[in-house]
Amino acid sequence: MTRGRGVGHLVCGRRAKWVVLVLWLILLFVVAPLASKLTDAQDNDAASWLPGSAESTQVLQASEEFRPEQIPAVVVYARESGLTAEDRAQIEEDARELKRLTDHGIIGAQTRGPVYDRETDPRAAQIYVPITMDEKGWERIAPAVDSIRDDVGEGGDGLAVHITGPGGTSADFSEAFEGIDSTLLLSAMAVVIVMLLFTYRSPTLLVIPLLAVVAALFTAQALIYVLAEHAGLTVNGQSAGILTVLVFGAGTDYALLLVARYREELRRHEDRHEAMALALHRAGPAVIASGATVVLSMLVLLAAEMNSTSGLGPVAAIGVTVALLAMMTLFPALLVIVGRWIFWPAIPHFGTADPTERGVWARMGRRIAGRPRTTWIATAAALALCSLGLLQLRAEGIGNADAFTGKPDSIVGQEVSARYFPAGSGDPLVIISNQAQAREVGRTVADTEGVVPDSLGLPPGTKPFHDGKVLFEATMADPADSEAAKDTVERVRDAVHAVPDADAQVGGGTAALLDMDRATTHDNLLIIPLVLLVVLLILCALLRALIAPLVLIGTVILSFAAALGISALAFRHLFDYAGETTDFPLFVFVFLVALGIDYNIFLTTRIREEAAHLGTRQGVVTGLAATGAVITSAGLVLAGTFAALATLPMVAFAEIGFAVALGVLLDTLIVRSVLVTSLFLDIGPKVWWPNRLAHEDNPRTPSSV
C-alpha cells in the first residue's frame, strides 16, 4: 500500500466514502434547526462589547441595582422660524401619548418632556422616552422606536421630527445588523460561485465545494448556538457576521488546494480512490497547518480586554475548525463519489500532461530565477512605499455620525438637537458614589469643565439609594461621542476619584467609548505580538526550519503595512471616511496574518517537497508553477468574501472588508508569487537552516529530511 494511502482511505475508500457521507447527512439533520437559532442567541447589549474590568462596565452593572438597564430615545422637534401654537399643542399631545406607551420595553410612565430650548418663542423641543435594555433589549429596540415614530409621526409643513439619542442610534444599528447572516451568506455565496466558475471553468464542479462549505457553516452555527445557550459563549452581530465570511473564505481556500492536488493525481493514477488518498496525504499537512494557524491565531483573541474581541476568538476558531473538518472529510468523499466527470468539460484523464509545467506561473518562476535579488529588492521597496500611507491612518475611533455609510434618522436628529440643546443631552454621565459623600461628589461633578450647569440630578424612575450608594446623572456640553466629551469624562473621573471615601465611579455612553478605546490600545499591543509568535512557531514546526519562517513572517508584516497604507489613503481620499475604529488595525492584522500566511504555507510546503529531490532552486520554480494558479484563485475567493462585508451599511465593517480584501490580493499576487519566490531563490538552500536541506542542494529522498 502506498505510504499515506491508508489515512486517505479512511475518508475516501470504496466503502468509507459512503460512511462519511451518511455521517454528515445525519449531522446536518440534527444541526440544521439549531443553526437557524443563532441569531436569537446573539447578545448585543453593552456588556457584550465593553471591556469586562472597565469602570464604565462596573457602573453599568451597579446601576442595575437602582433601575433596569435603560437607554433613552430622544424625540426632537424643530422649526427654525419658531414653534407655532399648533406645533406646541401637538408636541404636548405627543408627550401625553408617549407616557401611556408600554410596547417593546418602552417605560412610558418615566417619559420626560417636552423640554424646550428656551422659555419664550422656542424653536425646538425634546421628549425623552426610556426603553428597557434587558436580555431582549437588542431585539426590541427597533420595534420600540417604530412605536414611538408611529405616535409622533415624521413632521411636515416645516416642522422637523426626528428620533435620536442612544435609543434612536441603537435602533439604527440594530436595523443595520438585522439580516446580517442572510445578507453575508448570500453575498459570500455569490462571490464563491463566480470565482469557482472562473477558476474551475466547470459548471458542475463548483457544486461540490459549495455544498461542503454550506454544511460546514450550518454545523458551526449550530455548535456555537449550543455553546452560547449552555456554556456562556458570547456571540454578537460582529462575530456572527465574521463567522460567515471566515467559513466561506477559508473553506473554499482549502477546497481549491485539495482539488488542485487531486487533479494532479488523477493524471497519474487511474483509480480515483488512490488519487484522492495521495492528494490528501500530500496536500493534507499544508491544509491542516493552514487551518491550525487560523484557529490558534483566533484563540489568541481570548487574551483581549474587549469582550467583543475576546468573544470573537472562539467563535471564529470553531468556524474554521469545522470548515477544515468538512473539507478534509465530506468534500473529498463527495468528489470521489461523483467521479471524474464532475470536472467537465476539462476532465483530467489518466496519463495526460500536467499543464502547470508550461503555464504562466512556470514562466514567471524562470524569469524571477534570472535576477532574484533585483526582484525582491524592487518589490520590497514598492511595498514599503505603499506603507507610507499609514501616515494617513486615523484609528482613533469614530463617532456615531460617522459610523454609518449613509445618514439614518438618528444621526440627522443628533445634528438637529445639537443646534438647539446641549450636545450631550440624551446621553448623560452616570455617577455612582457612597451616600455619605454624595453631596460633595455632586458639587465636584457640577463644577467640572464640560458639564452643563444645573444638569445634575437623579435619573427618573430610580430608587434614590441602594446599599449605601447613590446614583445620579449629569449632562455634558459636547456631543457624547466626541473627543471633547471623552476629555470631560476624564476630568470628572479625576475629580470624583479625589473625593475622600466616596468610592465614586463614572460611567455612561461616553465613558464606555473611552474605556473601549483604552482597552483596544492594550489589545493591539498584546495580541499582535502573540499572533506573530503563534504563526512563527507553526511555520517552524511545519517547515522544520528557522530562516524560512522568519522570512515569511517578514513578508507578511510588510504586506500588512502596505495594505493598511493603501487602505488609509483610500478611506481619506476616495471614500471620504472620517476615520477608523480603534480595533481596525488589530482585526485587519489578525485576519491578514492568520489567513494570508495560508498562501505562503501552500507555496513553501510544496517548494520543500520538490526541493527534497530537485534541489532548492529548482524546487522554488516547480513549486510556484504547481501552486500559482490555485493560490491565486484561493486569494481571489477570500478577497471577494471579505469584500462582501461592504454590503453592510456600517463604516467599520466596510473598512475591515476593504483592507483585508486588499491585503489578501497583495499577498496573493505580489508577496507570495514575487517577493517570497525571489527571496527563496536568492537565499538558496540556506533558507532551510538548520535542516539538512540547508547543507545540500540535492537531498537523497524526501524521507531523509
Image (cartoon, grey):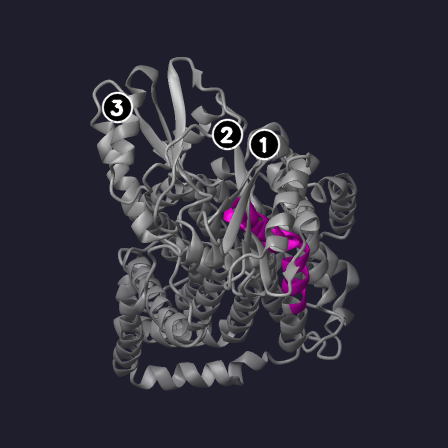
Which residue was labeled with disc 3? 440
Q: Secondary structure at mark 3?
A: helix
Closer-to-camera residue (400/385)? 400
Label at residue 134: 1
Q: Is residue 298 visible?
A: yes
Query: Which is more N-terminal, label 2 or label 3?
Result: 3
Q: Is residue 527 above or below residue 272?
A: above
Magenta region: 164-190
Circle 2: residue type? Pro
Magenta part mainly helix, strand or loop?
Answer: helix
Position in image of residue 224 (x %, y %): 61, 39
Residue shown at the point (49%, 74%) measured from the top left? 628
Closer-to-camera residue (65/54)? 65
Structural crowding at the residue carrying mark 2, measured as other residues with C-alpha within 10 Å and reported as few (<14), some (14–19) or many (≥20): some
Query: Which is more N-terminal, label 3 or label 1?
Result: 1
Closer-to-camera residue (165/313)? 165
Circle 3: residue type? Glu
Residue 172 included in the magenta stretch of the image? yes
Which residue was labeled with disc 2? 460
Mark 2 and 1 residues: CB-CB less than 8 Å, in contact? no
